[in-house]
Image: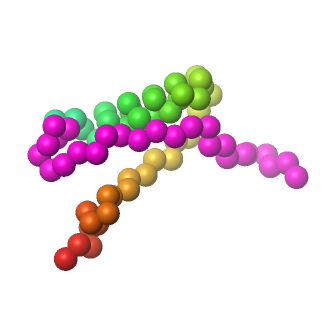
Amino acid sequence: MSYPDPVVIVSAARSPLGRFQGGLSGVAAPELGSHVIRAALDRAELAVERVDEVLMGCVLPAGQGQALR
């Protein structure tokens, strides 16, 4: 079966883990995210012009959840 608008995962990358007021506190989230996206594209050898959409998520380390009591 052929889909008219396929979703393709071509690569993945992650940012370094930081801590509150740590070494990455001066880096804005969009700037850090742009480096991660660039790394994923470089690994996939994919030109920016070929990308229509990017889905990005945030995963908290164990014990760092927002519902921590």
| Image position, residue 14 (x, y; %) | 41, 41
Residue 39 within the segment the image draws in magenta: no
The location of residue 2, given as percent across then percent down, is 85, 48
Q: Main secondary structure of the magenta part?
A: loop
Q: Position of residue 4 (x, y in %)?
A: 79, 46
**Along the viewing direction, whichever of 52 and 13 lies nearer the viewer:** 13
Q: Nearer the viewer, residue 50 or 13?
A: 13
Furthest residue in direction left, as rendered: 21
Q: Residue at x 52, y 40 (%)?
A: 12
Q: Tell me the quarter of the image containing the C terminus.
A: bottom left
The boundaries of the magenta stretch are 1-25
> Is residue 58 found left or right of 19 in the rendered image?
right
> Is 44 located above or below residue 23 in the figure?
above
Residue at horizontal 62%, vertical 43%?
A: 9
The reply, left or right, for residue 52 in relation to residue 3 is: left
Residue 11 visible in this rendered orientation of the protein: yes
**How far across and how far down the image is residue 64, in percent?**
25, 63
Image-quadrant location for residue 47: top right
Identify which residue is drawn at 32% across, 58% down.
61
Q: Quadrant of residue 16?
A: top left
- Left or right: residue 22 compared with residue 14: left
| Above or below 49: residue 61 | below
